[in-house]
Image (cartoon, rainbow, N blue to C red):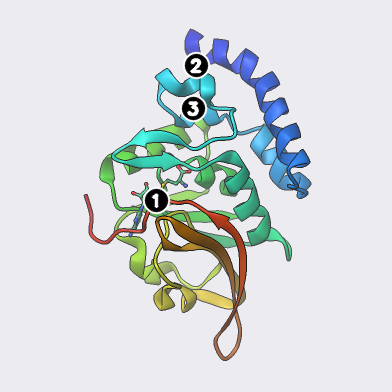
Amino acid sequence: MNRLHRGIGMTSLRTRDRLIQRLRSEGIGDLRVLEVMRNTPRHIFVDEALASRAYEDTALPIGYGQTISQPFIVARMTELLLESGPLDTVLEIGTGSGYQTAVLAGLVARVYSVERIEALQKQARRKFQELGIRNIRLRYTDGGMGLPEHAPFDGIIVTAAPEGIPKALVEQLKPGGRMILPIGRRTEQVMVRVTRTVSGYDRELLERVAFVPLLGGMQ
Ligand code: SAH
């Protein structure tokens, strides 16, 4: 660890505690999620120029027109995913900075995460190595069709918004498995929890959100 990281680390423990207090006061109740987020250095996942803002509860740019999700949204999606108990394998669509991936990795046995922008995926891989996280498998691919070769999953998190619920992803959930995703157009999105049933799926519409769009192809 270099001096810069150590320096930020000292203050970030305190600022991270403040962020966790704030998430609690905003309604995040899952103590496991809060503890993992307390221990996950978000400043590592943003550009050094933005590191001092890493513990504000806002999305920040990560390049290539993408953003690292707001901490509240990361906490909320993670607690919604884990509400019914611990999960074994989870698929994330949209690795981005890798922050949400790292939080998941602290809570489930194995995380598969796919990203369509190779440069972001490479950066994220380096961060996981730096932090010694070993239960993440990354794939550079268009995640719109999921990751059939590793399906079925106990849970799926989608961190970019498709216009509707992608059937291919629902089919990669185990029965009883859950998917948390934003759906809709850029200006009117809603977070949805999908639960796979024997015959199809149930969906619950949750709060309004704003994510970057799920795009096709690779870059
Ligand atoms: N969880 C990330 C969110 C990054 S923004 C974080 O907090 O950093 C959403 C990401 O989804 C972007 O990196 C974008 O490139 C990626 N993405 C969009 N469409 C995709 C697709 N079809 N397949 C894989 N990744 C996709």
Three-letter amino acid code at disc 3? Answer: Ile
Secondary structure of the residue carrying tag 2 is loop
Kind of residue indicated by mark 2: Met
Residue, x 70% and y 19% (percent of image)?
14
Q: Choose the circle earlier in sequence order: 1 or 2.
A: 2
Q: Which residue is mark 2?
A: 1
Question: Relative to 104, does residue 3 appear above or below in the rendering?
Answer: above
Of pointers 1 and 3, the one earlier in the residue sequence: 3
Furthest residue toward bottom = 199
Question: Which numbered mark, 3 or 2, is in the foreground of this view?
Answer: 3
Which one is nearer the viewer's eye here, 144 or 106? 144
The residue pinned by badge 3 equals: 44
Q: Position of residue 219 (x, y in %)?
A: 21, 49
Element type at mark 1: loop
- Which mark is nearer the camera, 1 or 2? 1
Asked whether residue 108 is in view, the answer is: no
Residue drawn where x is 50% and y is 8% of the image: 3
Residue 185: mark: none
Which residue is labeled 1 in the image?
212
Whether disc 1's CB lies below 8 Å from ligand 1 is answered: yes
Residue at 48% of width from left, 11% of height from top? 4
> In this rendering, is residue 160 above or below 101?
below
